[in-house]
Image (cartoon, rainbow, N blue to C red):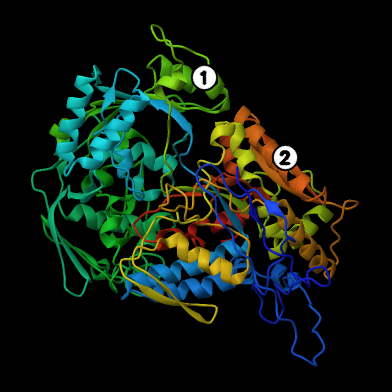
């Protein structure tokens, strides 16, 4: 493993702390970066090494002038404590994230030049990462696995829910050999259409002696709360529901968007009007397959009305401030109009649907695969007791979505069995409009709570599950077990490395903590912190230098290693919120970076621009390695944050600042922070122990990590995931837990979640 030189120590670091949170401006701003002197720090892996860059020294005061003493006052807690919850969130957000939001709102406003928009968003994300309120940890992938699912036989697009449709999956009875997987991916890359790909894949499988299974079996730890896809923003719900309905457009196995319930569409020249022509004759059915209606344009009007009634879930995607900007949607939500027909969704007739936007939103069509654009059969919904406020009723969903029998279906599958925390089974919908494309007519999803680290591996061997990822225990076993009739191990024969998808799991810092036990059950997750501990932690977690010290003391490789093994500890690591390769410039663009014009050529990745801003700010975070992925470049596969010496420098700066507000942090008086973990899972327990050891060692015992145990997955999830707002977040830091996957193909889909009232702000204790 190579090493690179860390950034130089700022000359003024030990003399005085930097000004990050002046009372006059009320938020954190970067005026320099503490770093280490000529030391080497591990930042790379076999995937590629970031080269790093040196930060320039601060210029100091003008000649003849006395240096100005740095003054740190922190948030005005007396004023904040007197505020109501939203006001308090606003104040803490502005203090900690004001600079990011200023940059981001300017980026969002750019809708004419999409390349300039992308570059400006990358710059604003750099400011977000510099705040330290959260730290990307890993993507959803990058571990060893074995499987019977033919690679690329389902959509792998990075946004939306089409990857959970399943029906195009090709599943073999035999585990796929590693070399055959590689060849299948090559065949996929050479195919021009999805039909050609499936024909060629089936021919290859037949030639190699594989046989196809008509059932897809999977194991997952997701717990479902609702069957109403429009009333949830959680992947753990959408995963189970997405295969029960079709969208207007869907991505095929080549990731090309194809007509689905819309046979065709047109977009007006001004980019404001989208007209969809609905496929006639498609039937809605109940769980038993009995017809309950025909799919018509009104199903999307009803859907939008239901979205509005559940605005806090997916409605933000309809807003002009947070999403695509459906005409008059905000006015409806704010009570400025009372006639829903003025909102920009209209059923012109049974088969003509029109959406109208407030202003052009180039990514609009990429949103069609998400739950907010799922159709809703109005009559069935009402038969379940559901009502719409748009029709003048007091809103209630009634029984709709409470079970698989309380939803209508127009997708590839019907639910045949649902046993909570056990198994969910599906069978092909005989009324599905595209039933000839169903490759796998049966699906079983088994619940796995993670308590047995070898269950998925053993089930995959026995063909109870189609495949499995190798945690550290399974990896050891797979490297020893030899299948009957073979001379090589399961690992040697069948293993492959999964690729990261668009989901980014993060480590969150709670800047607005208001509870020290689970909100839904005060007997679980009880903190042992004293009142003094709580007050000191609040001050520290609202200090940018302290947050960055935590981030750079976190050995994410060690954290990963206990889950996926030493060989792959870097493979899934992600260094930015939006994946570095998520977008590329289509044309050359010139942007302002710290007062200097910088031009990026066509083909530049999002992560490259983000790195340029970080380097200009002198913040020693590496989010882009141009040598990774065989020279293509990537923001994944290496640790661009972890550096104990930089962590100490940031901690020293924080200690100096916090001392000015009466908070001592030392070995004699360490700061205590609470971190939740699932004691029921060996891998989760071990990873949190690794986190604790990493921080406490790097920070010299001046920070103590209190691991707060939870005995089951449900109570654990209510400490960080199943929370409704930031007031309910029961932790100080939560590493590698809740994550975000994009809803559509624009960086806004990530960054909107961290703007004021953004969905993921609850993980930092706000809104």
Q: Nearer the viewer, residue 675 or 691?
A: 691
Name the element at disc 2.
strand
Residue nearest the viewer, comparing 727 with 501: 501
Where disc 1 sits, the SS reads: loop
Q: Residues within 10 Å of mark 2 (few under 14, many from 20)?
A: many
Q: CA distance from mark 1 to mark 2?
A: 32 Å
In front of the other: 184 or 1: 1
Q: Is residue 378 above or below residue 13?
A: above
Residue pointed to by mark 2: 707
Q: Label 1 crowding class (10 Å Cα cut-off): few <14, some 14-19, many 20+?
A: some
Please report whichever mark, 1 or 2, sits nearer to the chain's N-terminal start. Answer: 1
Query: Split into 4 quadrants, where in the image is the C terminus?
Result: bottom right
Residue 386 location, x and y as percent?
A: 32, 48
Return the residue found at the far top.
485
For the question of whether residue 617 can be seen, the reply is yes
**Rendered position, 36 above or below 332:** above
């Amino acid at each position: 493993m190579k090493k690179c030189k860390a950034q130089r120590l700022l000359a003024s670091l030990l003399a005085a702390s930097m000004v990050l949170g002046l009372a006059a401006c009320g938020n954190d701003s970067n005026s320099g970066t503490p770093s280490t002197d000529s030391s080497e720090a591990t930042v790379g892996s076999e995937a590629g090494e970031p080269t790093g860059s040196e930060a320039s020294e601060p210029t100091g005061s003008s000649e003849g002038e006395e240096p100005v003493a740095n003054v740190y006052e922190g948030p005005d807690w007396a004023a904040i404590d007197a505020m109501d919850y939203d006001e308090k969130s606003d104040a803490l957000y502005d203090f900690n994230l004001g600079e990011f939001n200023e940059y981001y709102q300017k980026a969002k406003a750019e809708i004419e030049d999409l390349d300039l928009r992308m570059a400006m968003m990358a710059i604003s994300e750099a400011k977000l990462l510099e705040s330290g309120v959260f730290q990307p940890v890993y993507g959803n992938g990058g571990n060893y696995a074995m499987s019977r699912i033919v690679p690329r036989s389902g959509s792998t697009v990075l946004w939306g829910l089409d990857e959970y449709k399943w029906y195009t999956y090709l599943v073999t009875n035999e585990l796929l050999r590693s070399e055959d997987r590689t060849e299948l991916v090559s065949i996929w890359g050479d195919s021009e259409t999805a039909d050609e790909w499936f024909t060629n894949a089936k021919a290859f499988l037949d030639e190699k002696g594989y046989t196809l299974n008509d059932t897809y079996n999977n194991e997952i730890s997701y717990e479902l709360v609702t069957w109403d896809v429009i009333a949830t923003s959680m992947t753990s719900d959408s995963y189970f529901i997405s295969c029960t309905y079709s969208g207007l457009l869907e991505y095929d196995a080549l990731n090309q968007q194809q007509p689905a319930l819309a046979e065709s569409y047109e977009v007006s020249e001004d980019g404001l009007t989208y007209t969809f022509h609905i496929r006639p004759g498609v039937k809605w059915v109940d769980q038993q397959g009995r017809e309950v209606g025909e799919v018509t344009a009104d199903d999307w009007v009803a859907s939008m009305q239901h979205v509005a009634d559940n605005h806090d879930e997916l409605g933000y995607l309809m807003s002009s401030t947070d999403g695509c900007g459906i005409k008059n949607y905000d006015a409806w939500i704010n009570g400025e109009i009372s006639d829903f027909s003025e909102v920009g969704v209209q059923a012109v007739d049974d088969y003509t649907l029109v959406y109208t936007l407030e202003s052009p939103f180039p990514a609009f069509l990429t949103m069609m695969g998400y739950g907010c654009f799922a159709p809703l059969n109005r009559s069935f919904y009402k038969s379940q007791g559901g009502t719409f406020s748009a029709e003048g009723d007091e809103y209630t969903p009634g029984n709709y979505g409470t079970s698989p029998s309380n939803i209508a279906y127009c997708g590839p599958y019907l639910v045949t069995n649902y046993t909570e925390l056990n198994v969910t089974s599906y069978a092909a919908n005989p009324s599905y409009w595209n039933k000839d494309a169903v490759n796998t007519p049966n699906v079983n999803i088994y619940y796995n709570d993670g308590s047995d680290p070898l269950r998925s591996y053993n089930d995959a061997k026995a063909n109870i599950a189609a495949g499995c990822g190798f945690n550290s225990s399974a990896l050891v076993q797979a490297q020893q077990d030899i299948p009957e009739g073979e001379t090589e191990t399961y690992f040697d024969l069948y293993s492959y490395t999964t690729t990261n998808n668009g989901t980014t799991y993060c480590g969150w810092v709670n800047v607005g903590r208001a509870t020290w036990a689970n909100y839904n059950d005060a007997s679980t997750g009880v903190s042992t912190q004293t009142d003094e501990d709580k007050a000191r932690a609040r001050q520290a977690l609202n200090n940018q230098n302290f947050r960055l010290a935590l981030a750079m003391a976190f050995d994410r490789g060690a954290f990963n290693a206990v889950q996926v093994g030493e060989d792959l500890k870097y493979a899934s690591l992600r260094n930015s919120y939006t994946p570095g390769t998520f977008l590329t410039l289509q044309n050359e663009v010139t942007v302002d970076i710290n007062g200097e014009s910088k031009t990026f050529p066509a083909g530049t990745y999002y992560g490259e621009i983000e790195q340029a801003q970080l380097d200009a700010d002198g913040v020693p975070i590496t989010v882009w390695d141009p040598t990774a992925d065989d020279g293509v470049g990537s923001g994944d596969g290496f640790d661009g944050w972890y550096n104990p010496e930089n962590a100490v420098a940031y901690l020293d700066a924080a200690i100096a600042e916090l001392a000015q507000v009466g908070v001592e942090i030392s070995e004699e008086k360490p700061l205590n922070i609470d971190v939740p973990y699932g004691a029921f899972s060996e891998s989760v327990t071990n990873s949190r122990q690794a986190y604790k050891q990493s921080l406490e060692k790097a920070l010299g015992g001046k920070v103590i990590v209190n691991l707060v145990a939870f005995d089951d997955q449900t109570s654990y999830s209510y400490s960080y995931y199943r929370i409704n707002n930031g007031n309910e977040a029961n932790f100080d830091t939560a590493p590698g837990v809740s994550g975000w996957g994009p809803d559509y193909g624009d960086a806004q889909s990530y960054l909107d979640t961290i703007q004021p009232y953004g969905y993921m702000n609850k993980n930092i204790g706000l809104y």
